[in-house]
Amino acid sequence: MTGPEAEGLTEAEETALREAVAEAVLAARARSRAGLGSDPAAHLVLVAASRVAAEETSRLLRQSINGARAAGHSWEVVGRLLGISRQAAQQRFATPTAGAAAATDAHRRVLTPLNAFNEMEALTDSGRRGWHVVDYGHLHHLVESSPTQWEHQRLWWPTRRRRRRMAEQGWELIVPTDFDSPWAYYKRPLDLPAEPGLG
């Protein structure tokens, strides 16, 4: 199946998703739903819960778009799913790739083109040779050399508990300069000397 039907949601799926979001907002505080008819403060709780939901769905939208772009989908397809033109989608959601534009020398280099399917292999190979990620963006990672080996990990939207556990295990979160990604990237040094070669 091709076309919008294969890429988007059915009407039933859209309805179910809308109902799930509404239910999550209404369930943010158990007593608020019951108090909507009698307690004026319950409406303020609903406003606060709706704001959080809107912020989270906005973040998910941007990260989903970045993920679709990284997977090779065009702005035309993304725009169609958003109900806007290709140009409007690109203007609103495209992010600059500061990492790719950063000056490189013998101690820094850009790994590109990368996507969700080949980037971890590239990072593993580079990590053995002492390169570790310092920034990343659309289809690239900016890496820096060191005398030790590094390991990298990619997680899909880790929870606060998972992030805390990663930190306890010595993993460092790599924060991009200006790129919203559907993934969170972590790195940690290994107690091994870097292997020779460029990686």
Image (cartoon, rainbow, N blue to C red):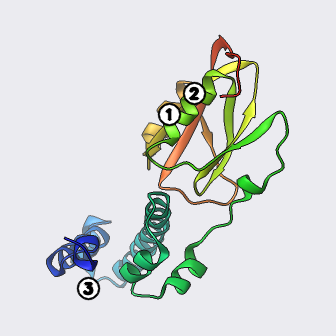
Observer able to see residue 179: yes
Residue under numbered circle 1: 121
What residue is shown at x 23% (from left), y 70% (from top)?
Answer: 20
What residue is shown at x 53% (from left), y 24% (from top)?
Answer: 169
Observer able to see residue 188: no
Q: In this view, does 156 lie to the left or right of 167?
A: left
How far from the left and from the top, in percent, is residue 185? 55, 42
Quick check: 15 above or below 1? below
Residue under numbered circle 2: 125
What residue is shown at x 43% (from left), y 66% (from top)?
Answer: 73
Query: In which quadrant will I find the N terminus?
Result: bottom left
Q: What element carries label 1?
A: helix
Front in this rendered view, residue 15 or 178: 178
Residue under numbered circle 3: 38
Q: What residue type is labelled 2?
A: Asp
Mark with earlier residue (2, 3): 3
Front in this rendered view, residue 35 or 162: 162
Quick check: 128 above or below 94? above
Q: What residue type is labelled 1?
A: Glu
Front in this rendered view, residue 188 or 160: 188
Q: What residue type is labelled 3?
A: Ser
Q: Is mark 3 on a helix, strand or loop?
A: loop
Q: Is residue 7 left or right of residue 73?
A: left
